[in-house]
């Protein structure tokens, strides 16, 4: 069975998958189900002038040093997710929330591989919108957290931009799970140890209780 090694090269995603589960590099990988559609999304994002990198095991598209959008492939669909969803205008009404704990509609969900081609004009317009926000340095308004983050986590996030971006991309429920898990520790040293051990899970988009 292939090793679980999260990818760092976006080309590998389209060839073998994300590396986050044991279906990586097998015919059963979710990327195999949706490859034509994912490749169309890739063409659209590259054609918009976005820079392609790999983050959290997925192709991530950047502009003006900001993350703009991320790809995801699942058993039942594939998605284009916008990273600063609270800023996005949705005149076509196509953005969806990814789950019950998602605060803002942040993704375009596809259930057939021709979907990106049909929506190409709209996708380009939404990418242009997000790119303009990045160029202007706009950020979503801060929202009050349901649970206070421990100071140790705040300090680590301030000094680790990659981890900070990954944590911000977590659903509110997953963020809350980390806050509860860390606040449950009695000492600062234990909290720091838990943060260090949990870094890979946060980068993988997982909550504290997820495997």
Image: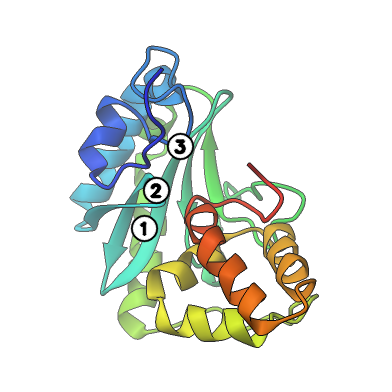
Q: Which mark sits nearer the N-terminus, 3 or 2?
A: 3
Query: In which image quadrant can residue 5 be found?
Result: top left
The relative height of residue 154 versus residue 71 in the rendered view (above or below) is below
Q: Residue at x 37, y 22 (%)?
A: 2
C-beta proximity under 8 Å, tags 2 and 1? yes
The quadrant of the picture occupied by the C terminus is: top right
Q: CA distance from mark 3 to mark 1?
A: 27 Å
What is the x, y in percent for residue 24?
39, 25
The relative height of residue 198 versus residue 24 in the rendered view (above or below) is below
What is the x, y in percent for residue 175?
67, 65
What is the x, y in percent for residue 178?
69, 65
What is the x, y in percent for residue 11?
21, 37
Query: Crowdedness of circle 2 by 10 Å Cα count: few (<14), some, many (20+)?
Result: many
SS at mark 1?
A: helix
Closer-to-camera residue (99/88)? 99
The relative height of residue 209 versus residue 4 in the rendered view (above or below) is below
Query: Crowdedness of circle 3 by 10 Å Cα count: few (<14), some, many (20+)?
Result: some
Q: CA distance from mark 3 to mark 2?
A: 27 Å
> Do we see residue 89 in this rendering?
no
Closer-to-camera residue (45/119)? 45
Q: Residue at x 39, y 75 (%)?
A: 161
- In the rendered structure, the answer to whether residue 65 lies left or right of residue 173 reads left
SS at mark 3?
A: loop
Q: Which dot, 3 or 1, sits closer to the camera?
A: 3
Closer-to-camera residue (117/150)? 150
Residue 20 tag number:
3
Q: Residue at x 35, y 40 (%)?
A: 120
Q: Which residue position is annotated with label 1?
A: 127
Q: Which residue position is annotated with label 2?
A: 123
Q: Residue at x 35, y 45 (%)?
A: 121
Query: In which image quadrant can residue 102 be found?
Result: bottom right
Q: CA distance from mark 2 to mark 1?
A: 6 Å
């Amino acid at each position: 069975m292939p090793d679980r090694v999260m990818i760092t090269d976006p080309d590998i995603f389209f060839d073998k998958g994300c590396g986050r589960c044991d279906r990586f590099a097998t015919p059963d990988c979710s990327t195999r189900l949706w490859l034509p559609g994912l490749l169309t999304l890739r063409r659209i994002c590259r054609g918009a002038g976005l820079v392609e990198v790999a983050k959290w095991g997925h192709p991530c598209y950047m502009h003006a040093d900001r993350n703009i959008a991320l790809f995801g492939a699942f058993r039942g669909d594939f998605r284009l997710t916008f990273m600063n969803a609270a800023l996005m205008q949705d005149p076509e009404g196509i953005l969806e929330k990814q789950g019950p704990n998602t605060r803002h509609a942040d993704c375009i969900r596809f259930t057939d591989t021709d979907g990106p081609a049909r929506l190409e004009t709209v996708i380009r317009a939404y990418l242009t919108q997000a790119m303009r926000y990045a160029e202007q340095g706009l950020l979503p308004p801060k929202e009050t957290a349901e649970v206070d983050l421990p100071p140790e986590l705040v300090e680590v996030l301030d000094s680790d931009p990659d981890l900070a971006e990954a944590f911000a991309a977590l659903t509110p429920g997953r963020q809350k799970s980390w806050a509860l898990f860390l606040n449950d520790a009695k000492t600062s040293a234990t909290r720091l140890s838990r943060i260090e051990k949990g870094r890979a899970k946060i980068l993988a988009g997982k909550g504290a209780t997820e495997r």
